[in-house]
Structure formats: C-alpha cells, structure tokens
Image (cartoon, helix red, strand yellow):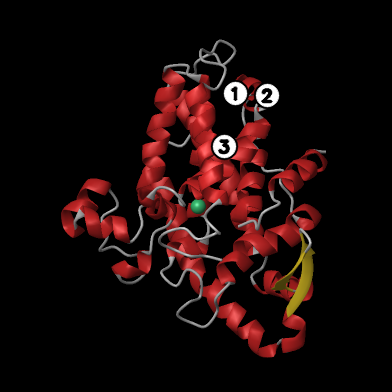
Amino acid sequence: MKTILLVPLLLALSWRQPRWGFYGHQLINYHAVFLLPPEMLVLYKAHINFLTEHAVDPDKRRYAVAAEGPRHYIDIDHYGRYPYDSLPRTWNAAVAKYSEDSVTKYGIVPWWIQTMLHRLTKAFSEKDQSRILKLSAELGHYIADAHVPLHACSNHNGQYTNQRGIHGFWESRVPELLAEKQWDFFIGKAVYIDKPLPFTWQRVLESAAAADSVLHLERELSKKFPPDKKYAFEERNGTLVKQYSFAYTLEYDKMLNNMAGRRMRASIFAVASFWYTAWVNAGQPDLKELTNQEFSEKDMKEFEKLNKDWLNSNGKAPGKDCD
Ligand SMILES: [Zn+2]
C-alpha cells in the first residue's frame, strides 16, 4: 500500500536525472515516517509528501552554497587505515588536530548530523512546525548519505580506478530497479539513541568498510560480464540515456548480497530514530499543538530558489561530481 502511494509521487518528482540519488533519499524519508510512534505520526504522516519531496533539498543546495558540499561525505581513507583511529571523533578534537580548513575539505557528514539533530531538537522545544518539518527532511538526507559507502571514500565515483559512474550506479540505479520490486521496508520501530555521535560514527565506519567491496566487486563483474550486455539504452523524458543494464545491475546486487537494500533499511531505521530522539530530548512536546503551521513567505522563497539554482546548474555542483 505504501509503495503504491509512493509511485506517482516519485514519478512526479524524479523527472530530472535522479541522483541514494533523489529517488533513494525520498524513499528513505518516506518509509522512516512509518517507524514513528502515534504521538509523532500526527504531524509526520500528515506531512509525508513534504518530508519525501524535501529529502533532496540539501543536494539541491550544493549548487548554490559552497559550504554545502562537505556536509554530505567524509573521505575517511585520507586519515589512514580502518578504523581510522588517528581521526578524533569529536569535532573540536578533530579541528584541533588537523585545522578546520583541512577537516572541512575532507568532509564533515558525521558532525553535521549532530548539528542538524541539535537544531531539530530546538525546533521541537519551540514547537515550530515549519522548522521541525524542514529540519527533519534535511536531517534524513544527511543520515542517509552517511550510510552510502562511497560517501565515506575518496574514490567516491571510481575516478581513481576507471569506474566512473559507479556512485550513481550503487545509490541510484540499483535502488531504482530493485527497491519497489524486491526490497522489504517493514523495519519495526524507531528507538531512542542514547549517544548519537558514536552511533553516527559506527554507521560511517560500516560505510567505509563496505566501500572496498562496492568498488572491487564491480571491477570483477565488469571483467566477466559480456561488454555488449553491460549497458542498455533507456528512454527518459524523450531522450535515450545510456544506463547500466538490468542484468548487470541484478548481478551486481547479488554479488554484494543486496548491500544497497541493507544500507537503505539501516538508513530508514536511523532517520526515524534520530527524529524520535530529537522529539524525546525536547521533552516530547504535543505535536497536535504547534505554532507556525504554515510555511512563511521566506520559506517558500527559499524552496523556490533552491529549485531554480538546481535547474539552472546543468547538473554541475562545485566540489564533488558524482554523476
Ligand atoms: Zn547528499
């Protein structure tokens, strides 16, 4: 039922080249809503379309705001070998050791998630509905990014190993072809996260550890797969687009033992649990009594500007290019 409802919405939203791609981020925020307790569902279910649509705002912002890029990843292999003990886990200690410029350059997603969690907690305390919704949608995005192996690896698009395109392959193409047909999103309930920073680091380290398989197994598959069957042309919005073929995608997913599906489920659980944690930490405010129930004119202008900058960008954001 959930999936059926989602399809028209996603089709409407993903008319531009989706990039977790746009599709994956939207799916994650959408399904996270159903893990929440009834006291939160009153707000989140009523605004599920907003939370789904705006799951991708942080990616759109990358086209207009230079500081946005590093919030989505961490090139953790820059800091040595797994488990990267030389990198202090707290922001202040990491900056004291490497300088803010350097830490920022290699990506800040684990810490940015804490900033967003703090902001969301404050929005709950103030019972500010429009900020709760905006920050929930965006926090969901960064948490989902932290679950993507290639967001925790400097070879993020296979550019060092002649595998350009693998970023979108893993996070967009695989879910687009398989999520609604094969993956199960009944995940249980959100839980309270006692220690959000160590929880985040655990997920980031899992991503970092998985990056090697993501790259290595695609290289192996590429060697043994008939080259003329690796890609297929598909029509999108009236244009023929070269894509990894269904057979190639299916084989890759099998070799990875459905890693993208497993990471997506872990993302959904984490997103719902962070939303829940913010609400609990704010004293479980009654979400039936919220102020500021409409988005302000300023909010609406901001959404409009995000879209405009993104549409005018030709798909090129400053910094990392993952297409
Ligand atoms: Zn992102």
Q: In the displayed image of the protein, which residue is found farthest to the left?
A: 96
N-terminal of the two: label 2 or label 1?
A: 1
Tell me the residue at 64%/24% (across/down). 41
Q: Secondary structure at mark 2?
A: loop
Q: Secondary structure at mark 3?
A: helix
Q: Which residue is identified by label 3?
A: 272
Q: Tell me where residue 35 appears, x and y as whole percent.
A: 64, 35
Which quadrant would the N terminus be assigned to in this image? top right
Q: CA distance from mark 3 to mark 2?
A: 16 Å
Q: CA distance from mark 1 to mark 3?
A: 10 Å
Q: Tell me if residue 201 comes above or below residue 54 in the rendering.
A: below
Instruction: Pick whichever, 215 or 164, lies toward us.
Output: 164
Q: Tell me if residue 71 comes above or below residue 54 in the rendering.
A: below
N-terminal of the two: label 3 or label 2?
A: 2
Q: Residues within 10 Å of mark 1 (few under 14, many from 20)?
A: many
Instruction: Name the amino acid type tagged 3.
Output: Ala
Is residue 322 visible in this depiction of the protein? yes
Q: Tell me where residue 241 appears, x and y as whole percent.
A: 72, 69
Q: Which residue is identified by label 2?
A: 46
As drawn, is 90 to the left or to the right of 143?
Answer: left
Tell me the residue at 50%/28% (across/down). 299
Q: Which residue is identified by label 1?
A: 40
As drawn, is 242 to the left or to the right of 82?
Answer: right
Q: Secondary structure at mark 1?
A: helix
Q: CA distance from mark 2 to mark 1?
A: 10 Å
Q: In the displayed image of the protein, which residue is found farthest to the top?
A: 289
Instruction: Name the amino acid type tagged 2.
Output: Ala
Q: Quadrant of residue 231?
A: bottom right
Tell me the residue at 74%/50% (across/down). 184
Which is in the foreground here, disc 2 or disc 1?
A: 2
Which is in the foreground here, disc 3 or disc 2?
A: 2
